[in-house]
Image (spheres, helix red, strand yellow):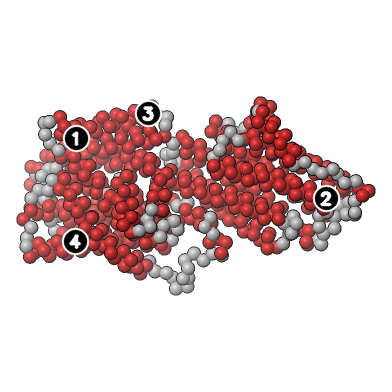
Amino acid sequence: MDIFNLITLAGGVAVFLYGMHIMGEGLQATASDNLERLLSRLTGTLPMAVLLGAAVTAIIQSSSGTTVMVVGLVNSGIMTLNQAVGVIMGANIGTTITAWILSLTGLQGDSFFLRLLNPSGFAPILAVIGVSYILFSKRDKRVSLGTVLFGFGLLMMGMEVMSSAISPLQYSPNFQKLFVMFENPILGVLVGAILTAIIQSSSASVGILQALAATGQVTWASAIPIIMGQNIGTCITALLSAIGAKKNAKRAAIIHLLFNAIGSLFFMLVFYAWHLIRPFSFLQDAVPMAGIALFHTIFNVAVTVMLLPFHNQLVKLSILVVHDDAQDSDEDQEDDFLKDERAQLLSTLDPRFLDTPGFALGQATKAINAMAELTNEGFSIACKMLHKPTEKRLAKVIRRENLIDSFEDELQTYLLHLSQRQLGDEDSIRLNIMMHSINDFERISDHTVHIAEAYLKQVHADSAFSAEAQGELDIIMSAVQEVLELTIYYFENRETNRGEEIEALEEVIDKLNLKLHDRHIQRLKANACTVEMGFVFSDILTALERISDHCANISFYINDVKEGSYDRHEYKMRIAQNSAEYKRYYQNFQNKYQLPELVSRSRRGGPYE
């Protein structure tokens, strides 16, 4: 084997690893919309969790990817540790499918059927089909499918290149001596663990071992401990992902390590103890590629069956390793409001999910929808303060506003990172709408606090709005409440072509605001309003108008951002001038939110008091 064989081998490994990487990305992009539903809702029983872990890993072709996602779900509070145990166990079974696929390269024969089953026959065809989808298809699902096919083709071609580059080693005595060294169980386990930890993929390291086995120089005695070591090495990805996570997430990563380490140790003790009593004659035989896949499957299934009854003990052991601090029995001490389920959505914005962009976007969507609902709740509470302003209600509004501020900070950062990942056209539009809307929801919440504080000034000033002023505020606040609820509904349900309704109501609110300002000035001139309460009235009107403007902004993003247009004034003018629907909505809202006739100043009963 000369230097050119080594260069070819390095290139083959590179193509193999890259193929596995982009195939996994394509599979995750295809399946990511359903991953949370599968992982978080269908893990009610342990056997179901095991089957689910195996299925998801077989789909995305990465036990590390599944385990990292599990760590993120536990960290977010979506999944419990007991649920995580089963999924982690199942992931070890699901990852064995890759070895079976790779073993197809060992098929030999002259018949058309066997040549077709060999990757050298079908891998180039899949790669061509995949590239065609990627380059010429505009549908996201086909692009993702093309990525999967192209990645799989590269994976198989990389395997072929590795096998060809390594083939001269079958005649090398030094290569044979090297694998004789790995027959030492401890050394073999270390080599398998270190190699897998470096490339962070047990499937890839098993594939490399299969390529080496094609030389005929790898024996069962050296392959078995290396495979057990690979199971331990794959835990490094989950352990790294748990750095900085909550304690339960760290425990999930520890369970993955304990499961694989205990399984490997137990299997080694039993296997080699039995070998001392009754030596296995097959250990010195060359291991075929399919033999590696077979042992990999038997080993992982056997370990899962063995440790399945002890899943609770694994959880307890992980708690001993990552124990609670003495000073806080509750890891996340928050007030009762912040323990609300919606508030917990903040923790679902886990960086671990960014590797599956569709899934991450789904989590971000839940968080921004919760932010929108909190915005609506805060405004509803502020509306009630018109007739009964209390410190308690103001505190509720402020608590929601503080939480919304947290949502804004977390979401802006998370969506920025997500925008740098590969997304389909529909997901990119959805992401842009969210990024533009976050600030508007936060500003609506800010203005809601200003309204609540303004109402409370009545109490501090020992004054109150007159029945006339309260009636006017009731009307405009009802209109603003409606425009906010409509905006949130259309935002959450991603309903386009409803901009006319929002724009029409926003225009009605603008004109109501102008009329109420005029009435306010008339009351000031007639001394029917104190200057201090007049300022309060004016502040409330200004805040209401701005809330309506922000709702119109969000509606604009929903309806027009997909067209790449960001000129809201042009958008509004186009609708107002050309849309019959806009005119119909405008007339209906104008009739609905009519102001009563202005009370004559001579019949008014004095100032606001």
User: Callout 4, which amino acid?
Assistant: Phe
Numbered badge on residue 117: 1
x and y, in percent, of residue 334 in the image: 54, 64
Cα–Cα span, label 3 and label 4:
48 Å
As measured in the structure, the alpha-carbon distance from the residue carrying label 1 to the one carrying label 4 is 34 Å
Q: Secondary structure at mark 3?
A: helix
Q: Is residue 363 left or right of residue 297?
A: right
Q: Residues within 10 Å of mark 3 (few under 14, many from 20)?
A: few
Q: Quadrant of residue 482?
A: top right
Q: Is residue 3 visible?
A: no
Q: Earlier in the sequence, mark 1 or mark 2?
A: 1
Q: Residue at x 51, y 54 (%)?
A: 346
Name the quadrant containing residue 22.
top left
N-terminal-most mark, 1 or 4: 1
**Residue named by callout 4:** 267
The one of 294 and 328 positioned closer to us in this rendering: 294
The mark nearer the N terminus, 3 or 4, is 3
Crowding at label 4, few (<14), some or many (≥20) Cα neighbours within 10 Å?
A: some
Q: Which residue is mark 2?
A: 468
| Residue for point 69% across, 39% down | 506
Q: Is residue 145 visible?
A: yes
